[in-house]
Image: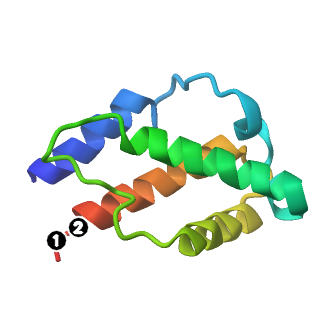
Amino acid sequence: MLKSVFVVSLAVAIGIGSARGRTVLGQGLTSCDGWTRAQGPERSTLETWIAGYLSSFNSLTDDASAPDFLKDEDWDGLIAWMDNYCATHPLDKLAKAAQALELELLNHHLAPP
């Protein structure tokens, strides 16, 4: 129960699921369709934005009881998750896809074994 409260509190604190979103800059404004079509250096730039976004979110707290939701995650698996999300949500912005991935990772790391 406490873990569920933590996820909801954290999600609300960062604006996921709230009516009032936060401003996003840079590559987070790229559409998922842009993610799907990107190749070479452009794709690398978008992937780097995702890595920074997830790493920043992961470092929001030093609380030992908060999960390290990137621990033991496979980068290629995270990129495949983004590929799948963007293929089914081409009009979403990359920031929205990253938020959905955050929630997925949090739920995964907070789920009972």
Question: How far across and how far down the image is residue 89, in percent?
Answer: 72, 58
Which residue corresponds to the image point at 63% horizontal and 73% vertical from the top-left? 80
Rendered image quadrant of residue 44 = bottom right
Rendered image coloring scheme: rainbow
Which residue corresponds to the image point at 16% horizontal and 52% vertical from the top-left? 3
Question: How far across and how far down the image is residue 95, in percent?
Answer: 64, 41
Which residue corresponds to the image point at 80% horizontal and 42% vertical from the top-left? 30
Residue 111 badge: 2
Question: How far across and how far down the image is residue 4, in percent?
Answer: 19, 51
Question: Which quarter of the figure is the C terminus placed in?
Answer: bottom left
- Residue type beneath disc 1: Pro
Residue at mark 1 to residue at mark 2: CA–CA distance: 4 Å
Relative to 55, does residue 88 appear above or below in the rendering? Answer: below
Left-right relation of 108 to 67: right
Q: Which residue is mark 1?
A: 112
Foreground residue, 101 or 50? 50
Foreground residue, 34 or 91? 34
Secondary structure category for the residue under label 2: loop
Which residue corresponds to the image point at 38% horizontal and 45% vertical from the top-left? 58
Relative to 40, does residue 56 appear above or below in the rendering? Answer: above
Left-right relation of 35 to 16: right
Number of on-image labels: 2
Rendered image quadrant of residue 81 = bottom right
Relative to 63, does residue 50 appear above or below in the rendering? Answer: below
Residue 33 shows in this picture: no
- Residue type beneath disc 2: Ala
Rendered image quadrant of residue 87 = bottom right
Answer whether labels 1 and 2 touch (C-beta < 8 Å).
yes
Foreground residue, 67 or 103? 67
Residue 105 shows in this picture: yes
Neighbour tally class for label 1: few under 14, some 14-19, many 20 plus, Cα within 10 Å = few
Secondary structure category for the residue under label 1: loop
